[in-house]
Amino acid sequence: MLVPAFNRRNDPFAIMRSMMRDFDRLSPTRLAQPVFPAVNVWQGEEAVAITAELPGVDPEAIDISVKDNVLTIAGQRTVPETPENARWHRNERTYGRFSRAIRLPFAASDDKVEARMSNGVLRIVVGRPEEDKPRKIEIKAA
Amino acid sequence: MTTDVTKTTEKTPVEAPETTTGGRIYRPLADIVETPDAVTLMLEMPGVGAEDVDVTLEKRVLTIRGKVHPAQPEKLQLVYAEYGEGDYERSFTMSDDFDADKISASVSNGVLTVTLPRAVEAKPKKIAVTTA
């Protein structure tokens, strides 16, 4: 990093500013794109449940798949249709494709996964397979 | 998988006043679109059904409230949380020219759409200026 010497004389903050500029250039501006959707995970003896808030997403447009112990939620949020002469005052919501993979505590089989959507809240229940459940071991009398 | 802390889309809680029940209130994200005949607001309120929405227009202030019924799966415990559940509330100051009786609202997939048609008499009237 080259620091021009002439700046130092009249402005003590010039070096710092030029360093900050270099840092900015190095780091992509939108490094931390927030992940969508946010999920809550619930666990119990018999199952694991995942809830996610997907407002404005049509249940038809959501794709849920399970492979071993990874559950993937993918889909698309579409921009609402507006008349041509419409003027936007605010645009706080975001649109576009999304995909999120969640690691489950066990490998799930497809037939044990149930998904339901109501009022924009997705609820996926993954049943725990029999072979994963703890087995109770009887103690035999000697 | 990485060890980085995942940053998820966040919900903004409403600042003061608190609720008596201790529950949190969130500020729903909004898209607002204006056409010559109406203003349409689209607010994200996941978990809110049509019967739990309350829209009022009083003294030019449009207040939108949504009540959430928390989705707690039976027999399961929350082990990891990225979002909180709570009611929604947000108000907007509108220009005077909306007819409170004509406001329509609908809920679809957790998005509330409120349409405020402009009052007929409030549609822009052109005033001719004459020279004296």
Image (cartoon, coloured by chain):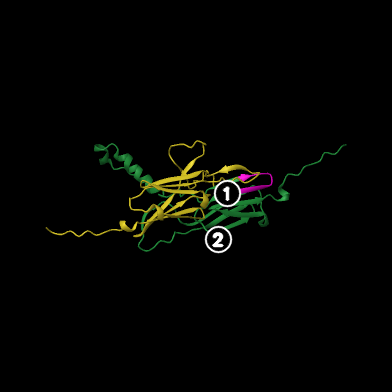
Chain colours: A green, B yellow
Q: Which residue is mark 2?
A: A60
- Image x and y of residue A113, in percent: 65, 54
Judge left or right: residue A60 versus residue B129.
Answer: right
Report the amino acid beneath label 1: Thr
Judge left or right: residue B103 versus residue B109.
Answer: left
Query: Residue A74 is drawn in which quadrant?
Result: bottom right
Q: Kindly state the secondary structure of the residue where label 2 is placed.
A: helix
In the image, residue A105 lies in the stretch drawn in magenta: no
For the residue carrying disc 2, how many other residues have a C-alpha within 10 Å: few (<14), some (14-19), or many (20+)?
A: few
Answer above or below: position of A79 versus A23.
below
Image: magenta residue range: A42-50
Label 2 marks which chain's residue? A
In the image, residue A48 lies in the stretch drawn in magenta: yes
- Image x and y of residue A133, in percent: 72, 46
Query: Residue A65 is drawn in which quadrant?
Result: bottom right
Labelled disc at residue A51: 1
**Which residue is pictured at 65% across the width and 51% down the height?**
A126
